[in-house]
């Protein structure tokens, strides 16, 4: 995967794509249910994009006469008939190319939910599974000078053995939900790099540079002009070189001062520029240390969804709005739940000064004993870490959320923790664990906790168990001497619905629950952060109450009209106090 795709010379294929709804997958299978792309000719599917040339031809589809939708964008929010649709839709885009002999070309997708079959000029490039991670295909030698066309078979059908599984609490938005780019690089190019501070060391930058292509042994220079840094390394026969740079004076990245440096990496024929911040993150006892200083993670959870305009976040304007709301809460931290958000979102967090919990959708009841399911989860985690390892905002890799205890689950999740640590030892590794209750004790005792850097867990006192009054009778029994970060708590409130504080769905009920949560949670000696559930109301087919929910999860602190609920101000006041305590 090309590191920093937006730093490359590229052609955007975003825009209006024609689409065909195909619930029976007639564009993929013949009438004997054999895939056309596996036939002797490889032809016959919608990906051929046949045009009527002879009046006697039988062609039962036509992209040009079909409707179009915006890409990036989910299909559910762009057509009423597709709001609940799960299945296959074909999408086609035409574009002009002028391929050069001394260049390589990659067709890049930021995300397609869930399974994508990609064809270029009628020829299959490959398949990708996973709705939230980027993928690319080498199309060098496959482009035509002049007009080309790309066809994507996108299928968002849920399956038990996939990641996530069939059961989630968010809308299953289908389609090409992030950017599509055609990138151009030299025949020998900088494929990957990591330029970050060494683990727990403010005085040394460590990392690597990885070249790919025909001349992989060469000198590569890393420059940070503003910091007076310039160092050259020589890559080995496999194109790899380790980078170690002593640091005398840097302005370290913090939420209060999110300093980003221009970093230039130059080889013999390729050069790339990135904006990178430098900071360390580690734990010591019950403290989380940012640049060696104890911090409290004043956070909020959020989905990749715009509450005001249906569908996935469409671009930087939507993303800035969400992160700005978090800043208005006085957050220094966000949990990007429950799957990888876009690269642009994480880069905005870099710029705006918000630390990030980044997560993969290992969520609820996964097929723990299926090797293919684990391989899929491991690939999604690896793709996330590879994409975002240079983002200073990302301080935590999360391997999952609310997974029920069992030996197969413990093995599966433990292996994901090992994967994360093998790919990046400079960040914390966590998961949103579950709790159990023993009388009035809330017990946090999960075997996975031994492998993690944080005691992070979800608890819904006052909503799914107890109520806003009796919840104060509970105490937390935590079995680990580690920093405690509460990954979820909350209550549903319909924006604008007011009653007394014992009436569910009212803003007053949610407000009191937040107040009492702070009383409960501040009694935990190791409490070092939280991400209440959730910044804004979001859509979910699980939420069926026709008046209070209407397919919305109402736990947001901001309603679907953008109005702040009463609990928003309660959380902000608490964060103002915590900021003063951790100056």
Image (cartoon, grey):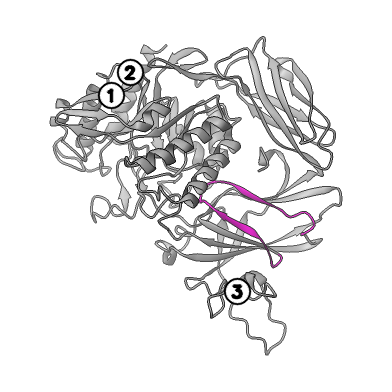
Please give the range of residues in magenta: 121-142
Which quadrant would the C terminus be assigned to in this image? top left
| 1 and 2 marks in contact (CB < 8 Å) | yes
Task: Left or right? Give the position of 7 relative to 113.
Answer: right
Q: Position of residue 247 (x, y in %)?
A: 67, 13
Estimate the x, y position of residue 536 in percent, counting from the top left.
37, 40
Other residues around mark 2 within 10 Å, as few (<14) / some (14–19) / many (≥20): many
Please give the label number shown on residue 65. Answer: 3
Image quarter of residue 7: top right
Observer-side mark, 3 or 2, equals 2
Q: Name the residue furthest right.
A: 101
Q: CA distance from mark 3 to mark 2?
A: 62 Å
User: Circle 1 sits on which residue?
Assistant: 478
User: Disc number at residue 526?
Assistant: 2
Instruction: Say few, some or many: other residues with alpha carbon within 10 Å of mark 3 (under 14 / 14 to 19 / 20 or more).
Output: few
- Whichever of callouts 1 and 3 sits on the residue coming sooner in the sequence is 3
């Amino acid at each position: 995967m090309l590191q920093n795709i937006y730093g490359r010379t590229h052609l955007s294929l975003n825009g209006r794509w024609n689409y065909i709804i195909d619930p029976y997958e007639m564009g993929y299978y013949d009438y004997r249910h054999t895939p056309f792309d596996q036939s002797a000719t490889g032809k016959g599917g919608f990906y051929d994009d046949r045009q009527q040339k002879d009046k006697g031809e039988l062609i039962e589809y036509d992209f040009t006469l079909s409707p179009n939708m915006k890409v990036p964008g989910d299909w559910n929010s762009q057509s009423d008939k597709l709001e609940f649709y799960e299945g296959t839709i074909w999408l086609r885009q035409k574009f002009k190319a002028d391929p050069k002999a001394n260049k390589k070309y990659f067709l890049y997708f930021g995300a397609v939910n869930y399974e994508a079959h990609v064809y270029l000029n009628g020829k299959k490039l490959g398949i990708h599974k996973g709705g939230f991670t980027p993928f690319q295909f080498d199309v060098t030698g496959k482009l035509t000078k002049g007009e080309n066309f790309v066809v994507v078979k996108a299928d968002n059908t849920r399956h038990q053995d996939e990641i996530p599984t069939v059961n989630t609490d968010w809308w299953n938005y289908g389609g090409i939900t992030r950017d599509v780019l055609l990138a151009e690089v030299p025949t020998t190019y900088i494929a990957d790099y990591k330029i970050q501070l060494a683990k727990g060391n403010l005085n040394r930058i460590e990392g690597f540079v990885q070249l790919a292509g025909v001349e992989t042994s060469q000198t590569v220079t890393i420059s940070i002009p503003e910091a007076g840094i310039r160092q050259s390394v020589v890559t080995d026969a496999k194109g790899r070189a380790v980078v170690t740079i002593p640091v005398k004076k840097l302005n370290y990245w913090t939420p209060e001062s999110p300093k980003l440096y221009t970093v230039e990496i130059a080889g013999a024929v390729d050069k790339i520029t990135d904006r990178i911040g430098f900071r360390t993150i580690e734990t010591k006892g019950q403290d989380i240390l940012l640049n060696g200083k104890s911090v409290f993670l004043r956070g909020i959870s959020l989905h990749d969804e715009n509450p005001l305009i249906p569908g996935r976040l469409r671009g930087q304007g939507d993303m800035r709005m969400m992160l700005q709301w978090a800043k208005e809460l006085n957050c220094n931290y966000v949990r990007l739940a429950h799957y990888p958000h876009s690269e642009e979102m994480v880069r905005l967090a870099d710029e705006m000064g918000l630390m990030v919990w980044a997560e993969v959708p290992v969520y609820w009841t996964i097929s723990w004993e299926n090797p293919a399911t684990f391989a899929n989860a491991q690939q999604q985690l690896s793709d996330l870490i590879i994409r975002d390892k240079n983002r200073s905002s990302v301080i935590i890799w999360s391997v999952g959320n609310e997974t029920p205890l069992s030996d197969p689950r413990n093995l599966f999740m433990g292996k994901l923790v090992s994967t994360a640590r093998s790919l990046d030892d400079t960040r914390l590794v966590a998961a949103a664990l579950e709790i159990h209750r023993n009388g009035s004790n809330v017990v946090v005792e999960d075997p996975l906790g031994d492998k993690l850097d944080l005691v992070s867990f979800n608890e819904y006192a006052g909503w799914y168990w107890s109520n806003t009054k009796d919840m104060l009778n509970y105490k937390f029994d935590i079995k680990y001497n580690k920093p405690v970060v509460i990954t979820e708590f909350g209550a549903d409130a319909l924006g604008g619905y007011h009653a007394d504080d014992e009436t569910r769905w009212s803003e007053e009920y949610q407000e009191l629950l937040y107040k009492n949560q702070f009383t409960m949670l501040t009694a935990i000696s190791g409490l070092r952060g939280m991400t209440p559930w959730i910044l804004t109301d979001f859509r979910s087919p699980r939420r069926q109450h026709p008046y209070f929910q209407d397919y919305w999860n109402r736990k947001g602190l901001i309603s679907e009209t953008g109005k702040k609920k009463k609990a928003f101000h309660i959380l902000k006041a608490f964060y103002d106090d915590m900021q003063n305590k951790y100056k």
